[in-house]
Image (cartoon, rainbow, N blue to C red):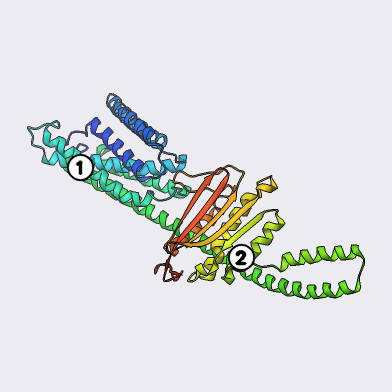
Amino acid sequence: MNQILNALPDIPRLYTAISEWVACLVYLMSISCRKPPKRTITVLVVGLGVLIGVQYWAGSLPIAFWIFSMCVAVACMYSIIMLASSMQALTGAYVLARAFVLAELIASLHWQIDSFLRPPTSTIHAPASIALLVAIYGGCGFLAWWGERRNFGVGDIDPPGRSVFIAATISVVTFAMSNLSFVSTNTPFSGRVGLEVFYIRTLVDLCGFALLYAQQEQVRENQASAELASINARAYSQHREYMRSKENLEAMGRLAHDLKHQIAALRTEIDPERQSRNFEELEASIQRYGSQQHTGNPVLDVVLSTKERICADSGITLTVVADGSLLAGMTPIDVSTLFGNALDNAIEALKKVDNPDRRLIKVALFSRDRFAVLQIDNTYASHLNWKANGELATTKRDNVLHGYGVKSIRHIAHKYQGEMTLRAKDHWFHLCVLLPMVNGQLKPTAASATL
């Protein structure tokens, strides 16, 4: 026996096209890297018409062209996703695999329920059938969007190539297994009765979608773990730099103090004007290395003093007005990481500024309405690469290893229940960190207090 008993009619081509369109809409609404609304709407409207046309065209072809026509429909879905978003090609393929399985699931589930509930004398154009179509397509689309927005709505979608391959494999296997009964009923995995065939198809599509959902959950967790590990590594690196700088500053302070006494003694013995002028230059040089910032926070003093020397060597003017007492409650490693990363980013940007008079950094730490406010402003010359979600992308070639400075700053801001904002205007880059104060101190969140 190689025929399906009591076979149900094929899913109408129009319904298949609508399910594919709904799946594209779900993922375009879930991701944060969409094109402007006007373009997205235009792509969706045109895309719906193209999908309907492709499905009716495929229906006029011999059954031997079934796989080919499915490939054309999938290509149309991919075009809709790519034209309405700013994703990379590989990322678009990853989203397409999920959208295709979702489209198969919605179409199969609706047709199975509709065929079971619809009276023999009724048609698919009856009001009850149309209402069921809207309810199932809309309900499934909403549930899928509600679940996927958590996976795709925050940050960039950047799945590894291996994950894209796995998603594509799951999609192909799901499609093949769910449609196996239509190819042959003489297999251990095929159904032989109409409703049974569609039950198998719906169940396999549901399992495929669940696998893809679980895969994205795992990818997201892996990325979050890798990002947190990189942030922590950068934090400890900044802290080690702070400890080394503290030791160097203490040693240089003692050296400067001793040299001042030696210079004073030499001045009494050497009278020529030229010799005196040389000693004055030497004293000024020693004074620069012996000076330190005094903000009221010893950790911040070390960080600012270290960065001040780096700025002086690089021809950068650093201006600081900071009340370090506002950082009471913040751990030393967070203080060094917060200010170290912020100033490192500013110094890196200013190294690309050719005009020495434009190499400026302004640091301000003050209180305002029960908030500690950190503002760091610096000029810049190179083009800023803003991502679609408003984040600033690194300008370094190795964007895998770099770009965690800003993430570290944001992580610390969130740790103390605050927020970080970035803004650029008139070739000035502005970083602002707003931290709420409780009883005059910064309080970390309970979840991050032990990190």
Q: Residue 66's image quarter?
A: top left
Crowd class of label 2 (few under 14; some 14 to 19; many from 20; radius 10 Å): many
Tell me if residue 98 comes above or below residue 270 in the rendering: above
Residue 154 appears in view: yes
Q: Which of these two is toward me, 342 or 120?
A: 342
Q: CA distance from mark 2 to mark 1?
A: 60 Å
Give the label, 2 or 1, closer to the camera: 2
Closer-to-camera residue (6/212):
212
Quarter occupied by residue 39: top left
Front residue of this view, candidates 316 and 29:
316
Left or right: 435 in relation to 187: right
Q: Position of residue 93 (x, y in %)?
A: 42, 41
Residue density around tag 1, few if under 14, some if 14–19, many if 20 or more, within 10 Å:
some
Q: From the viewer's perspective, is residue 344 above or below residue 246?
A: above
Q: Position of residue 257 (x, y in %)?
A: 75, 74
Q: Secondary structure at mark 2?
A: helix
Tag count in the figure?
2
The residue that label 1 is drawn on is 136
Residue 419 in the image: state x and y as whole percent.
Answer: 44, 57
In this picture, residue 312 sits left or right of residue 209: right
Nearer-the-camera pick, 78 or 338? 338
Whether tag 2 and tag 1 are in contact, CB under 8 A, the answer is: no
Q: Amino acid at mark 1?
A: Ile
Tag 1 secondary structure: helix
Residue drawn at 59 percent across, 71 percent down = 298
Image quadrant holding the N terminus, namely: top left
- How far across and how far down the image is residue 281, in percent? 81, 63
Mark 1 or mark 2, which is nearer the start of the sequence? 1
**Relative to residue 240, is residue 327 drawn left or right?**
left
Label for residue 303?
Answer: 2
Question: Looking at the picture, which amino acid does disc 2 mark?
Answer: Val
